[in-house]
Amino acid sequence: MNNNYFEDQQFSGLTDSDIAVQYNEFEQCTFNNCDFSGMNFKAAKFTDCQFNNCNLSMINLTDISLNAVEFHNCKLTGVDFSLCNDFLLDVSFHQCLLNFVNFVKLPMAKTLFRGCQLHEANFTQTDLSGAVFDECDLKNTIFERTNLTQADLSGAENYIINPEKSRIRNAKFALSGLPGLVAHYDIKIV
């Protein structure tokens, strides 16, 4: 184990051979153009950090802490966020590729997803109350027993949500998203 503490540092162009992340703590750090794909982030702590233009596909997030962490223009394909420590979990995603990600059972109230592609993501039993999906593509994303109370999906597209299986009270949807809310009724909207 490394158990190193990094504060207010910028890391650029790193790969998995340049730095060990697991068991380390990062506070107010910025990661630019790093390729951490497939890397083990186990038990690392990130507080007030930002990832810009990074490849984080298939990283191991077992027991990782993410508090006030922003991802900008990052690739996070196949990441299982449900392995994170959910205490104080606070993340936001801006123009990120989030295909095949798993957010099952996480407390993600008021999470911001802006300009993201979330194909085949899984939000089963996730608390997304007050979350915002702005200009997001949610093709084949799973919303099952999901709390979408006061969530804003008015800027999202390609979602299918069964209102009988998820809470959607006071959620916002665009009129163009209506087919995704009635798809399970096997009716046609013309």
Image: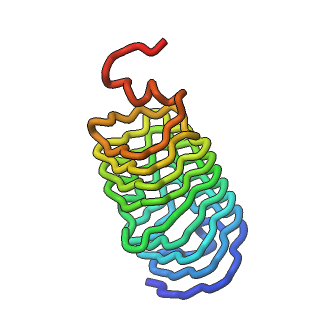
- Residue beneath the point at 58% across and 62% down: 36
Please tell me in which quadrant of the rendered image residue 117 appears: top right
Residues 143 and 21: in front is 143
Indicate how the structure is coloured in the image.
rainbow
- Residue beneath the point at 54% across and 71% down: 68
- Residue beneath the point at 41% across and 32% down: 160
The number of callouts visible is 0
Compared across the picture, whether 172 is left or right of 184 comes to right
Residues 120 and 187: in front is 187
Compared across the picture, whether 51 is left or right of 172 comes to right
Compared across the picture, whether 159 is left or right of 36 comes to left
Q: Position of residue 143 (x, y in %)?
A: 36, 42
Which quarter of the rendered picture does the N terminus lie within? Answer: bottom left
Compared across the picture, whether 47 is left or right of 129 comes to right
Residues 155 and 16: in front is 155
- Residue beneath the point at 68% across and 81% down: 9
103 over 154 or under it: above or below: below
Please tell me in which quadrant of the rendered image residue 14 appears: bottom right
Q: Position of residue 140 (x, y in %)?
A: 43, 33
Residues 171 and 184: in front is 171
Q: Position of residue 73 (x, y in %)?
A: 66, 54
186 over 153 or under it: above or below: above
